[in-house]
């Protein structure tokens, strides 16, 4: 998928610093673009799943924090994967298998062109299930899981309400301590399918674990600075006002500049820290 987006960007002609920076922020979900129409068609024909189908058809295929379609797609895909394999594996093996996301997802997607693929049949029932039957089963499970939390108006669901990122201090790990001693808990964009990664594990789908911890664009013709930011700060000292000084820019996607030459550092300095040896 990275090659797809890099190739798509290169088709636009000469690449600039700005185009490289935008690539680092890209949250377009190509898998969602490929599958959303198939899923919406499977859910059509009644009122029960109309809201889910409408959210998919209205989705711009970008996993932004305010996107209803992103949350719908991710939930449907998760429950569809579980419904496909749960009758063929023990609970422990199912967790291990789906936890290997890149393998299990590629395998699952390879089945999706065949509505009657035997993997979609639930061997514990007399009826032979199809792919579209499992999309509807995934829709039922999605509503059961999400409606109690976010209400029955699917258009008001938001990916960032479900999908978050937590920055905690390594001395005091955990979500509670993160609110006071770390960078806090924030709605988070992206997914396993986006260049701007927001990958969560199968056993903890609400917490992004694999992220773009450093975004950097280096222009080799400019030896004064690079464009970069990371979700930390200029100091690692607990309670320092600069411990999380770069986090707001990282969350918003705004560029920061890291200066090299003494002159550029002096011209752009906001604060100066002077270290003096202790008296003997």
Image (cartoon, grey):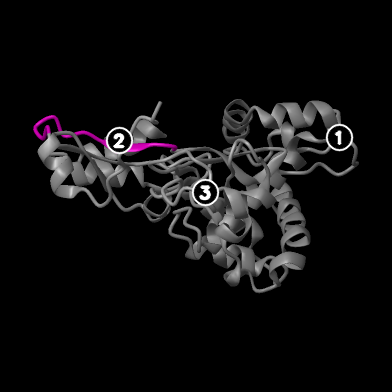
Q: Nearer the viewer, residue 262 or 132?
A: 262
Q: Name the residue under label 1.
A: 123
Marker count (numbered): 3
Query: Between tags 3 and 2, which lies in front?
Result: 3
Element at label 1 = loop
| Label 3 crowd (10 A; few <14 / some 14-19 / many >=20) | few
Q: Residue 29, can we see it?
A: yes
Residue at coordinates 66% horizontally, 49% vertically from top-left?
A: 177
Q: Classify residue 81 by image quadrant.
A: top right
Q: Residue 239 carries which label?
A: 3
Q: Is residue 41 above or below residue 16?
A: below
Q: Nearer the viewer, residue 270 or 130?
A: 270
| Residue 196, position as x, y percentages in the image | 42, 42
Q: Quadrant of residue 272?
A: top left
As rendered, which of 174 and 153 lies closer to the eye?
Answer: 174
| Residue 12 visible in the displayed image | no
| Numbered badge on residue 18 | none
SS category of the residue bearing label 2: helix
How many angstroms separate mark 2 from mark 1 (CA)? 42 Å
Residue span colored magenta: 213-223
The disc, 3 or 2, on the residue closer to the chain's N-terminal end is 2
Quadrant in which the N terminus is drawn: top left
């Amino acid at each position: 998928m990275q090659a797809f987006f890099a190739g798509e960007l290169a088709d636009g002609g000469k690449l600039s610093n700005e185009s490289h920076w935008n690539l680092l922020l890209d949250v377009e979900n190509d898998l969602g673009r490929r599958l959303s129409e198939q899923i919406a068609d499977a859910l059509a024909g009644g009122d029960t799943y109309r809201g889910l189908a409408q959210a998919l058809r209205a989705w711009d295929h970008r996993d932004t924090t305010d996107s209803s379609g992103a949350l719908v797609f991710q939930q449907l895909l998760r429950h569809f994967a579980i419904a496909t394999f749960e009758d063929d594996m023990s609970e422990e093996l199912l967790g291990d298998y789906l936890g290997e996301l890149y393998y299990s997802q590629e395998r699952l997607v390879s089945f999706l062109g065949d509505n009657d693929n035997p993997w979609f049949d639930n061997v514990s029932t007399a009826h032979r299930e199809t792919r579209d039957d499992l999309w509807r089963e995934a829709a039922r499970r999605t509503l059961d899981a999400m409606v109690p939390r976010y209400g029955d108006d699917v258009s008001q669901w938001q990916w960032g309400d479900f999908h978050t990122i937590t920055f905690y201090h390594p001395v005091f790990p955990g979500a509670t301590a993160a609110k006071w001693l770390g960078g806090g808990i924030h709605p988070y964009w992206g997914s396993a399918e986006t260049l701007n990664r927001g990958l969560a594990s199968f056993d903890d789908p609400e917490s992004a674990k694999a992220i773009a911890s450093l975004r950097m664009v280096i222009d080799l013709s400019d030896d004064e600075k690079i464009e970069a930011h990371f979700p930390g700060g200029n100091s690692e000292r607990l309670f320092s006002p600069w411990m999380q000084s770069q986090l707001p820019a990282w969350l918003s996607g705004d560029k920061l500049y890291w200066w090299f030459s003494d002159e550029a550092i002096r011209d752009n300095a906001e604060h100066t820290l002077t270290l003096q040896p202790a008296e003997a």
